[in-house]
Amino acid sequence: KEAKPDIVLVHGDTTTTFVGSLAAFYNQIAIGHVEAGLRTHNKYSPYPEEMNRQLTGVMADLHFAPTEQSRQNLLKENKDPGTIFVTGDTAIDALKTTVKEHYTHPILEKIGSDRMILLTAHRRENLGDPMRHMFRAIKRLLQEHEDVQVVYPVHLNPAVREVANEILGDDPRIHL
């Protein structure tokens, strides 16, 4: 209240994004949502992020969409086209500003000229059987493509680590 901002910018789909929007709304401060318009149209997947996105979108005055598809989602929700701006993906922007042209790492040297898949998998809705199915699909993919290797920085969650080591750990083309 003391700062009296003209606008509150919120980013993404976390609960803090939603609560920040709600606080701005309660104080009648304009809201700008960065990463607006991402939708699965299933309020429980990803949970709770999809509902955080949708509720933030209801309160937002300006929508900074990462893609044209996100813009289309917002238009289908009857958002004013003049409030929607396709600005690109902040994760890609961050990657472009941090990746060095001549970066090297022992794992990358091992991979050589093979094609590489960078795998991330840790969301709670993927734990258990969904993660097992995903890891088995990765193994099948490698059987079909001998010139592909996988780099998977495994999450610290023991439920993720155990399944990753069990299913992926013995494959020399998967680097955990």
Image (tube, grey):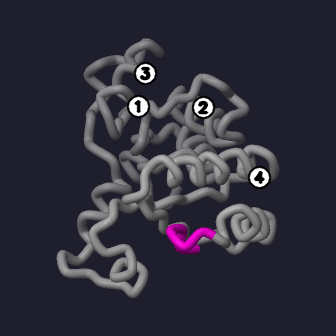
Q: Residues within 10 Å of mark 2 (few under 14, many from 20)?
A: some
Lower sequence index among marks 4 and 2: 2
Is residue 30 something one can see in this rendering?
no
- Separation (CA) of disc 1 from disc 2: 12 Å
Residue type at mark 4: give it. Answer: Leu
- Separation (CA) of disc 3 from disc 4: 28 Å
Residue under numbered circle 3? 73
Q: Position of residue 24 (x, y in %)?
A: 53, 44
Lower sequence index among marks 3 and 4: 3
Quadrant in which the C terminus appears: bottom right
Magenta span includes 173: yes
Q: 153 or 140: which is nearer to us?
A: 140
Q: Secondary structure at mark 2?
A: helix
Lower sequence index among marks 3 and 2: 2
Lower sequence index among marks 1 and 4: 1
In the rendered structure, the answer to whether residue 104 lies left or right of residue 3 reads: left
Q: Secondary structure at mark 1?
A: loop
Residue under numbered circle 1? 61
